[in-house]
Image (cartoon, rainbow, N blue to C red):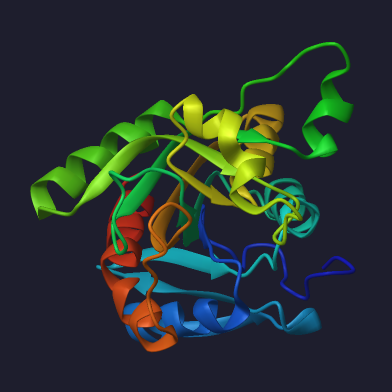
Amino acid sequence: MTPHNSAKAGDYADSVLLPGDPLRARWIAENFFEDAVEVNAVRNCLGYTGTYKGQRVSVQATGMGQPSLSIYVHELINFYGVKNLIRVGTCGGLSEKVAVRDLVIAQGATTDSTLVKDAFGPYNFAPIADFGLLRDCVARAEVAGLNYHVGNMVSSDIFYHDDGLKSYEVVIRHGALGVEMEAAALYTLAARFGVKALAVCTMTDSLITGAALSAADRQSSLRDMVTLALDVAINA
């Protein structure tokens, strides 16, 4: 147990999916797991373990943003021995070639957060996905015929920028595909502790075209992403 997690040692599988939203964690457990058991409800940041295609797997909500995710990921690795962490979430689109409902598989993640900068002093660390997880995810997405894009994600600490899209001009010029709030911290912690990590996001709102999914469409559009992530997780 930790101040943020009531799970006992052994309650989590080696592979854990990481949605930000606690209700999405519950939805994953209820719709994809067999024999799902709630292992954490502290602060309503829900965690579950069950089986998927006969393999043990877990899901743990992380809350919004890199500071919150960092707490849960640090504890999952260091207190619960988790080896493979796959973020499943949504992102805003920063490229015209990414349509709503498309998947963005984050090969790398750049950030405006000082969390990474403070840890590396004079170095500009490049947070990247585990290549094995990335390769397997891309191969499975290809076989499934999913619309996906592989490239750089932006992890921002700010949701409401005063200058809107202008805040992202430099990363857009350098080919960033999407923006969310967690992947860079996930990749940095995975590198620090020698575990595997990947972030897969469904693009739900384009900052370029203004296209967006309704709340109902968001939930239904996530099914392909979660199925893909679970298949990668149980084969990690």
Q: Is residue 25 above or below residue 170?
A: below
Image x and y of residue 137, in percent: 29, 43
Can you say which quadrant of the picture contains the N terminus? bottom right
Q: How many marks?
A: 0
Q: Could you tell me which residue is drawn at 49 percent across and 27 percent down? A: 173
Q: Could you tell me which residue is drawn at 76 percent across and 54 percent down? A: 75
Q: Could you tell me which residue is drawn at 28 percent across and 44 percent down? A: 97
Quarter of the image where one finds residue 71? bottom right
Image x and y of residue 190, in percent: 63, 36
Q: Nearer the viewer, residue 87 or 193?
A: 87
Residue 93 visible in this rendered orientation of the protein: yes
Side of 64 relative to 47 (left or right): right
Side of 19 relative to 7 (left or right): left
Q: Is residue 224 above or below residue 27?
A: above
Quarter of the image where one finds residue 96? top left
Q: Nearer the viewer, residue 162 or 205?
A: 162
Residue ranking furthest to the top: 122
Q: Is residue 32 above or below residue 107?
A: below
Image x and y of residue 230, in percent: 34, 60
Q: Could you tell me which residue is drawn at 19 percent across and 39 percent down? A: 139
Image x and y of residue 146, in percent: 17, 54
Can you say which quadrant of the picture contains the C terminus? top left
Residue 137 visible in this rendered orientation of the protein: no
